[in-house]
């Protein structure tokens, strides 16, 4: 019995032990499974959350990498056309080809309307691969299906309505040569077009928010004059939307700055008049509103040989007497200004009328200078593309505040034969490089962060860029 008991006991113990150990290991398995499931659930929640509210830094950097991929363009330049008239002091045979209305490469520069970007085609459809891609150079339709008319423009992000507004030259009229066919190609003033968007891709036409004057020939906005490069900023103190623009006569001799104001971003803007800032000529221009709300006017002056920069008055309606001369003798125009990590940058073009030329990027620690010219920011395409700013001219740089270092470079691919059919070239602009290093380097030279504009046939903004908190 004892033996039996003795014998039995261990069996019972073993049995208990086995049951217990099985129970334990099952519990461990269950606990682990629950833990793993929990983790999966949390990860799922997190990833859903991130796609809605924020982008994981790694995700964004991998997207940055994608935007930084070098995309080449290959096409054969046809042999020179003997009939071709030199329309500009072009720097590449590509520009000659570009300016030739009969070029066999026309479809490369100005893709046919059947390839238009049409955001309405995706409405109601599942977001697929074709959704919200920018196709630089293609016709871009608004939500009514009409080509967007906002050339030489700018983007205003309106905090009050959480909406982007795109303003630009409304050029939907016939192109003709000024001065009895001897002057530059022009379209009579129609006004400033305004479009609104929540996603920087689908644009609803809000109308012509500043209109031309049809009868009074003495008025700046008389259709026979020139209204170019309108820029709009909001003044928190006066609660007015202020538009500044290049006002000129058909000879580009008036060289003035015009000002208009509105209580709403969609106008109508009331024209207040024009002036030469501090008596100086002012042609291509832009406006930059700094973080401290001081706004600066930047314009090509002194026969386009020098650029001027200076603060506006507090109400943004006038210039102050403070002004600095920058890029002296460099003949730059089409300024587009932006800021990253306390450094100011400007992209400019050379002065070759509607013909494209090489962009340059300039940088400064302080907005009034000293400004330094860094070089050509264009990457990809091919060499001829890069020295012609992808056959376009700078107009504005849009900050994507929630993605520090990523900007949209906005440029115009002018079509001097048919200005209303000028195209938009929007590309990613990325500032990277030495921004963590001290800027004062050996030999007394400053090493600026690298500013690059990457050519892409098609590209899109990183997912969730405008929903980041
Ligand atoms: C360009 C200028 C454009 C327009 C054009 C007229 O140099 O950037 O805004 O003025 O000349 O030829």
Image (cartoon, helix red, strand yellow):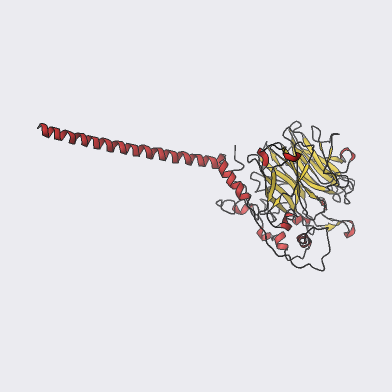
List x then y, in percent, for residue 271.
82, 41
Residue 152 visible somewhere in the drawing: no
The number of callouts visible is 0
Quadrant for the N terminus in the image: top left
**Residue at x-position 56% and y-position 44%:** 59
Quarter of the rendering occupied by the C terminus: top right
Left or right of residue 187: residue 59: left
Q: Report the front residue among 97 and 12.
A: 12
- Above or below, comparing residue 433 to residue 384 in the picture: above
Q: Which residue is painted at 57% across and 41% down in the image?
A: 57
Q: Position of residue 262 (x, y in %)?
A: 77, 38
Residue visible at 16% across and 33% down in the picture: 9
> Which of the 4 image quadrants contains residue 167?
top right
User: Which of 200/294 is in front?
Assistant: 294
Residue 424: image location, x then y, percent = 71, 52
For residue 256, which quarter of the picture?
A: top right
Q: Position of residue 257 (x, y in %)?
A: 84, 42
Q: Residue furthest toward the front?
A: 443
On screen, residue 426 versus residue 319, left or right, reads: left
Q: Confirm whether residue 94 shows in the render.
A: yes
Q: Judge by depth and name the residue closer to the eye, 165 or 290.
A: 290
Residue most toward the left? 1
Q: Is residue 220 above or below residue 355?
A: above
């Amino acid at each position: 019995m004892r033996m039996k008991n003795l014998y039995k006991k261990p069996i019972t113990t073993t049995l208990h032990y086995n049951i217990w150990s099985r129970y334990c290991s099952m519990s461990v398995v269950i606990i682990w499974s629950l833990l793993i499931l929990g983790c999966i659930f949390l990860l799922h929640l997190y990833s859903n959350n991130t796609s809605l509210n924020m982008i994981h830094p790694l995700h964004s950097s991998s997207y940055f990498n994608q935007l930084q991929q070098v995309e080449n363009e290959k096409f054969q330049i046809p042999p020179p056309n003997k009939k071709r008239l030199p329309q500009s002091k072009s720097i590449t045979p590509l520009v000659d080809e570009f300016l030739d209305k009969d070029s066999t490469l026309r479809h490369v520069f100005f893709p046919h309307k059947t390839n238009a970007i049409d955001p309405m085609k995706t409405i109601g459809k599942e977001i697929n691969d074709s959704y919200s891609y920018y196709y630089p150079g293609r016709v871009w339709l608004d939500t009514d299906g009409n080509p967007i008319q906002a050339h030489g423009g700018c983007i205003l992000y309106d905090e009050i309505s959480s909406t982007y507004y795109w303003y630009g030259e409304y050029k939907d009229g016939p192109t003709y040569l000024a001065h009895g066919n001897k002057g530059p190609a022009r379209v009579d003033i129609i006004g400033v077009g305004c479009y609104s968007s929540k996603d920087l891709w689908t644009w609803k036409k809000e109308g012509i928010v500043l209109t031309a004057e049809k009868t009074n020939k003495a008025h700046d906005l008389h259709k026979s004059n020139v209204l170019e490069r309108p820029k709009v900023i909001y003044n928190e103190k006066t609660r007015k939307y202020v538009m500044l623009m290049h006002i000129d006569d058909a000879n580009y001799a008036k060289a003035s700055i015009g000002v208009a104001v509105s209580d709403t971003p969609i106008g109508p803007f009331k024209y207040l008049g024009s002036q030469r800032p501090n008596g100086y000529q002012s042609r291509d221009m832009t406006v930059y509103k700094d973080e401290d709300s001081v706004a600066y006017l930047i314009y090509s002056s002194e026969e386009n040989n020098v650029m001027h920069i200076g603060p506006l008055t507090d109400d943004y309606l006038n210039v102050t007497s403070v002004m600095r001369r920058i890029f002296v003798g460099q003949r730059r125009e089409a300024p587009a200004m932006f800021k990253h990590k306390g450094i100011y940058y400007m992209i400019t073009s050379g002065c070759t009328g509607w013909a494209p030329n090489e962009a340059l990027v300039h940088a400064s620690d302080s907005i009034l200078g000293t400004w330094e010219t860094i070089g050509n920011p264009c990457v990809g395409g091919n060499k001829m593309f890069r020295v012609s700013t992808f056959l376009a001219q700078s107009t504005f740089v849009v900050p994507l505040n929630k993605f520090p270092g990523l900007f949209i470079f906005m440029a115009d691919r002018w079509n001097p034969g048919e200005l209303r059919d000028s195209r938009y070239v929007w590309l990613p602009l990325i500032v990277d490089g030495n921004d963590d290093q001290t800027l004062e380097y050996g030999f007394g030279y400053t090493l600026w962060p690298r500013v690059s504009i990457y050519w892409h046939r098609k590209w899109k903004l990183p997912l969730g860029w405008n929903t980041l908190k």
